[in-house]
Image (cartoon, rainbow, N blue to C red):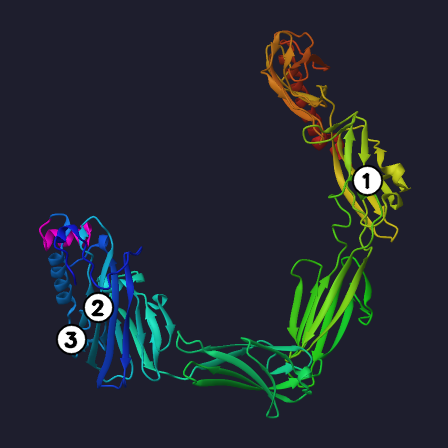
Amino acid sequence: MDIAEDPEELTWVWPDQLPPQDDDIMGDSYLDISGTIAPSSNITATWYASISIRDDYGTDLLPDRELGVRAQIDQHLGDGDGWLSIPEIADFVTLVENARNLTDSEDSGCCLIDYSSMHSVKGTDITVIPPANGSVDSNGSWGWIEDASLIGTTDGRSTRILDIPRVGGVIEEIPLRVTLPGFWEFRYSAMLEIIEGEPNNFTVFRHQAPVASDIRITLGKNQPPNAFFTRETGGSVIPLALQTAYSGQCTDSVLDDTQLWWTVHRNGTKVFETQHENLVFTASELNYSDGEVATVNLHCLDSFSASGTATENIVIDGLDPTWEATFELLGDENSTGLDAGSTHLEVPSGIYIDFTFSASDVGGLPVAIEVTSDKSEGWRHSGNDLLQFTDRFSQSGEVNGMHLNVTERHEAKESSEYNLSLMVTDDAWNTVTHDWVFVISDGLGPTIIPDIIANGTPISPESPARAGDSMILSLTDSFDDLDAIVDVVWEVRVNGTAIAEGAMWAEVEKLPLPITEPGIHLIHILAWDTAGNMEEISFGLAVSPARGVYISVLQHIMVGDPIEGEEITIIATLQNTGADLAAGMLCSGSGCSDEVIVNAADSVGPGVFNVSLVLNLKGTAPIDLRFEWISDSAGMSGVVHIENDYVVEPQWQAPMQVLLGVLTVLMLLAWGAHRLWGQESQKP
């Protein structure tokens, strides 16, 4: 090297000085394991590493790494004058050489074999490319190159364990390439995500490891790949005219790019080959016949030219299965068969149908039967060889119903149709299908939806029909599933008396009801469609009494003797035929009873109530009885006079009446004695 007379004014350039770099650390390392790898024997390898580091990254060989390597050298190996001199650089080179001149492969950041370090045969050759001299504020890069021949010892197992240190050293920040001899290959590592390459030539990116822990790799002699496949068509046989599909895979070292291909042989002759991952072929297109055997092979070949094969010999079935079907309509006593050979079948709405399907195959293997329909989502029945079930098809609620407006409901509709599909599949997946259409005939009577309108308002619990109201039976919301409403025939009865009979729609849509009295009135409605289907409903119409209070006397009694000076009780039973409550008192003269509640009448009958009045008879004048009442809800009041024939007797007549009673008894006794013992008793 040439040094100027004034080295402080010149920049000294080290041979092979590294250029500036963007990454903090760059380079690569290489471990080549050569020779044989046998159990319990020596193993040899070559180690090589080349690394370059930005000046401002610093080094862990000196304190204050955060200052950058130039300031570290100036402060800890130099005079701290802000200038990196040649002697200071030379001291740093010596420091690096001593630090990296290691004979232990683990300490150098290389590796361990079978849990033991390998050792350098002649030491480590190191070439240091130091930072350029000059101001500590400039920024370049520095690094070194090292190589060594290593030797170690294996243990007695057939599998080798390669451990790569990950403890935070700067040498771990560059990729490590590993090559293996002969037929040895990468087998497994839990850190597979940071390893890439080929089975015997792979690279470990240990700086990407998520944890500071040794990266363990198992090595072993190459084994032929394993071939696996799954046939996705048929059971114990495959079809002749349909596609047969296989899916397969080759398993080997995770780093091996194993080749895969398929061959199909007929009587020992290859008739088909493909390198796709999945095999698909049609036997008839390869000139196979029913009953012949196809030989299917999956071939696997790894990077060491070792191969594995999986084989299946499969019989070809070229005959379709056969089937039969019977359909029977189930009646109350007898059943009626349908022609299953017809593709369009008409059945009454809602009637149960007994379905029977049977299937067979010439090989005697099970035959799958599946029946589906658009009757409802997911409607499906399935079985093997024999399938029986019972179901019914009804006129669809979508044909006519409350989801339509009144005008649409009253129009004629088309019958519902349901598709029934049969699929019969044998063990080779040969499939036969058949379809039927079930047309639903009119088997249901009209839908009767009555409404009662009183004085122009539909009745409700809050607004009931009342005696005296003008009542109309409205059938406007009614409809038939298929017929137009004008074609429906009606009959209406009120309390057993027909008010419409054989009537058409115009006569009954708004039908006046001859009801004037409160009570429960039985309404019976019948309707027939053009197919003769009849529907009927009956219901009780509760007619409430008219609003107001209308009181009358049912009966009254007197308890006690009506004698002047005595006390009697008058008990009266009255009824209210009005729908409002009231309150009232039973009175006589100026005296009145306690107030009682006057019950309201309802559709069951009048509101009946009792009231009692205690009277002290102070004279013999006739007893005047009246019931005085008032109703806040009805805004009414009144007086009901109660006629009676009660007579109050004077007090002096009471002893005379007793005397007369005694004399009468004595006379009766005397007459009786004379009859028993007198002259008349002596007559013969």
Q: Quadrant of residue 54?
A: bottom left
Q: Is residue 178 magenta?
A: no
- Mark 1 vs mark 2, CA separation in Å: 91 Å
Contact between marks 1 and 2 (CB within 8 A): the answer is: no
Q: Nearer the viewer, residue 594 or 676?
A: 594
3 vs 1, front mark = 3
Q: Nearer the viewer, residue 108 or 321?
A: 108
Check the image and name the residue furthest to the bottom.
268
Q: Amino acid at mark 2?
A: Gly
Q: Amino acid at mark 3?
A: Gly
Q: Residue at x 81, y 60 (%)?
A: 439
Taking 522 as reference, is 627 above or below it? above
Mark with earlier residue (3, 2): 2
Name the residue that disc number 1 marks.
407
Range of the magenta residues? 63-80
- Mark 3 vs mark 2, CA separation in Å: 15 Å
Mark with earlier residue (3, 1): 3
Q: Which mark is residue 109?
A: 2
Name the residue that disc number 3 marks.
123
Q: Quadrant of the C terminus?
A: top right
| Disc 3 secondary structure class | loop
Mark with earlier residue (1, 2): 2
Where does residue 449 sit, x and y in percent of width and height?
77, 41
In the image: residue 80, left or right of residue 145: left
Q: Which mark is residue 507?
A: none
| Disc 1 secondary structure class | helix
Q: Amino acid at mark 1?
A: Thr
Q: Quadrant of residue 551?
A: top right
Where does residue 650 sit, x and y in percent of width and height?
65, 9
In the image: residue 561, left or right of residue 340: left
Q: Sort mark 1 into few (<14), some (14-19) or many (20+) by Cα contacts within 10 Å.
A: few
| Disc 2 secondary structure class | loop
